[in-house]
């Protein structure tokens, strides 16, 4: 009897939103050959990751076993699925299989970083089969909020797995493939061992709505507007950008797209042929001469990004275009949890300028790109696998999805990042755990969250910082000079100037120190750190971070 096994291991995206990265393996335990599905990013914020540019899944485990990696497959071109690929392609020496639209987005990213695109392999048809190691993989088209999204059908000697990626059941997605029920029936008729399934909207009880149903409501809203109309959505949601643009044209308005990311997405979709009839747009320069009641801007920044077009317009003007009282701003998007503060800031700034804002509390102008609970149940019944593993979502989503599966008679478990799941039998079994976490792109440098750099920044932000430079002599009557600088701390404490009190206390500490302490740098530094902490607690109630520099005179 063979002891080979089929395993699933999420490195990111299971128990969180973003950072999607999933490993499938087949072979003898600890000798499996792997394929990697997706390699995405998450975006930082000042509260948890100040100064960071991008957040990546921790690749430490995969890099230890990179010689066992056969290939990489990318389900679609959203940043949380493809955004890290260009940053790791040099150290993952295997082909990267993608569909055409995703390939063009990924190539642009790799070229921007000066990376070769030779590893990118374009898969054009559902019938194209990629044989890699013990796996045979095909891209199964699905509808989502970006063109050419796909699930993956992964065949192995241990059974066939369908990895859904992000999907919704939409018969009219405007751009891209509709969800093909007959194709899914045909694929599933051969028997599916496991379904690894998107969980994002498991708490949404109503059936999902189609992208094609938005157009009349948006057109009516634009027609009622008196001034200029500005609308924002995810830059990658080409279907929504087209819905907005078509509605604007029918309402008698010219269209101007603002934001490099959105412009690049639209241009790429046109170039590869997934967008064939996008309305003509005007440049920002020409838009300035169009009467406001005849103009609509479609802009980036739906998540409150401070440098995007939405935020800059809310602060005054962008590309010499400015909002005025009586204009209308539409969020045709859902605010991702964690981005509420940035979005509310933009809303309030527009409100202060007299602009009317329609946000995501109005349900008529946005539909989700993910399957709601009834649609998940429909897919479960369509595929009818032995096992369903929830993925892509916070822990509460995974847990509720697993509960739903078990209620309907399917074997299921919650497998968060780092959980090795043995899928070989009829029941999923946890076979072990690997350490996972986050890596940061900080300027031009990548480092691990375990390095403590971000933790130090947060500590400085919360508690302030003191730099102390001491020049001293360990002789019987030591000479002492203390130079210090505080940052992020009150100028005054309970006794007066904080700098002066710290200076005096440090001077007294050195003069009172034993010669054995003065001649031992480690001991002296500990004494001075204690003095700074004790003085700051007494004066301002804070314990700052600090640097103590010692300069001993002979």
Image: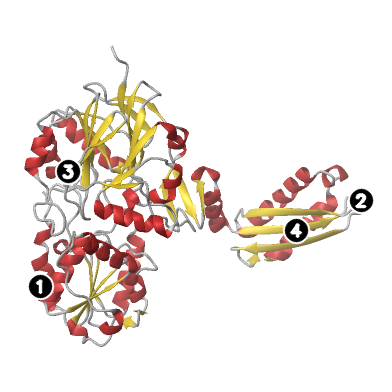
Distance between the Cα atoms at labels 3 and 4? 67 Å
Q: Is residue 122 left or right of residue 408?
A: right
Q: How many marks?
A: 4
- Look at the picture and state if 261 lies above or below 228: above
Rendered residue at 32%/78% (across/down): 352
Instruction: Specify the quadrant of the image occupied by residue 196.
Output: top left
| Image quarter (top left, top right, bottom left or bottom right) of the N terminus | top left
Distance between the Cα atoms at labels 4 and 2? 19 Å
Q: List x then y, in percent, for residue 277.
A: 14, 67
Q: Which residue is mark 1?
A: 220
Secondary structure at numbered mark 4: strand
Q: Mark 1: few, some, or many residues within 10 Å (few <14, many ≥20)?
A: some
Of callouts 2 and 3, the N-terminal one? 3
Q: Which residue is mark 4?
A: 469
Asked whether 248 or 310 is in front, the reply is: 248
The disc at residue 475 is: 2
Of callouts 4 and 1, the N-terminal one? 1
Secondary structure at numbered mark 3: loop
Colour scheme of this structure image? secondary structure
> Is label 4 or label 1 in front?
1
Instruction: Specify the quadrant of the image occupied by residue 519.
Output: top right
Q: Mark 4: few, some, or many residues within 10 Å (few <14, many ≥20)?
A: some
Q: Is the residue under label 1 in contact with that under label 2 (CB below 8 Å)? A: no
Instruction: Specify the quadrant of the image occupied by residue 467.
Output: bottom right
Q: Is residue 77 left or right of residue 62?
A: left
- Look at the picture and state if 364 lies above or below 423: below
């Amino acid at each position: 009897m063979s002891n080979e096994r089929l395993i699933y291991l999420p490195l990111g995206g299971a128990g969180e939103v973003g950072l999607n990265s999933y490993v499938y393996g087949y072979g003898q335990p600890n000798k499996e050959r792997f394929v990697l599905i997706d390699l995405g990013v998450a975006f930082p914020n000042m509260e948890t990751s100040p100064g960071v540019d991008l957040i990546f899944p921790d690749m430490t485990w995969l890099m230890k076993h990179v010689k066992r990696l056969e290939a990489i497959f990318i389900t679609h071109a959203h940043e949380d699925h493809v955004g890290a690929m260009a940053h790791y392609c040099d150290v993952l020496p295997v082909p990267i299989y993608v569909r055409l639209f995703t390939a063009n987005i990924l190539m642009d990213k790799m070229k921007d970083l000066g990376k070769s695109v030779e590893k990118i392999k374009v898969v054009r048809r559902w019938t194209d089969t990629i044989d890699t190691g013990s796996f045979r993989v095909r891209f199964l088209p699905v509808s989502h909020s970006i063109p050419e999204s796909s699930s993956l059908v992964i065949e192995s000697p241990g059974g066939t797995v369908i990895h859904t990626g992000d999907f919704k059941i939409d018969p009219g997605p405007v751009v891209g493939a509709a969800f093909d029920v007959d194709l899914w029936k045909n694929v599933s008729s051969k028997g599916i061992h496991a379904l690894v399934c998107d969980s994002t909207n498991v708490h949404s009880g109503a059936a999902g709505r189609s992208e094609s149903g938005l157009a009349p409501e948006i057109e009516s809203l634009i027609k009622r507007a008196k001034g200029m109309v500005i609308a924002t959505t995810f830059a990658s949601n080409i279907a929504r950008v087209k819905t907005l643009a078509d509605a604007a044209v029918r309402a008698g308005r010219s269209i101007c797209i603002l934001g490099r990311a959105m412009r690049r997405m639209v241009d790429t979709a046109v170039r590869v042929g997934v967008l064939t009839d996008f309305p003509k747009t005007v440049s920002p320069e020409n838009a300035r001469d169009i009467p406001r009641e005849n103009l609509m801007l479609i802009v980036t920044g739906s998540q409150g990004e401070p440098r995007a077009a939405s935020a800059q317009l809310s602060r005054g003007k962008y590309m010499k275009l400015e909002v005025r009282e009586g204009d209308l701003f539409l969020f045709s998007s859902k605010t991702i949890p964690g981005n509420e503060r940035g979005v509310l800031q933009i809303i309030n700034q527009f409100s202060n300028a007299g602009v009317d804002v329609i946000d995501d509390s109005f349900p008529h102008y946005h539909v989700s790109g993910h399957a709601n609970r009834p649609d998940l149940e429909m897919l479960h019944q369509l595929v009818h696998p032995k096992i369903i593993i929830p993925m892509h979502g916070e822990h509460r989503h995974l847990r509720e999805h697993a509960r739903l599966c078990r209620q309907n008679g399917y074997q299921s478990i919650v497998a968060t990042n780092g959980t090795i799941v043995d899928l070989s039998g009829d029941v999923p079994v946890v076979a072990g755990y690997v350490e996972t976490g986050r890596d940061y792109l900080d300027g031009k440098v990548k480092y691990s969250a375990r390095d403590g750099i971000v933790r130090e920044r947060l500590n400085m932000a919360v508690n302030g910082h003191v730099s102390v430079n001491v020049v001293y002599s360990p002789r019987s009557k030591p000479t002492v000079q203390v130079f210090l600088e505080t940052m992020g701390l009150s100028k005054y404490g309970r006794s007066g100037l904080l700098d002066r009190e710290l200076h005096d206390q440090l001077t007294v500490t050195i003069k009172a120190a034993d010669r054995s302490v003065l001649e031992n740098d480690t001991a002296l530094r500990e004494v001075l750190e204690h003095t700074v902490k004790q003085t700051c607690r007494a004066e301002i109630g804070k314990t700052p971070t600090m640097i103590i520099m010692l300069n001993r005179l002979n």
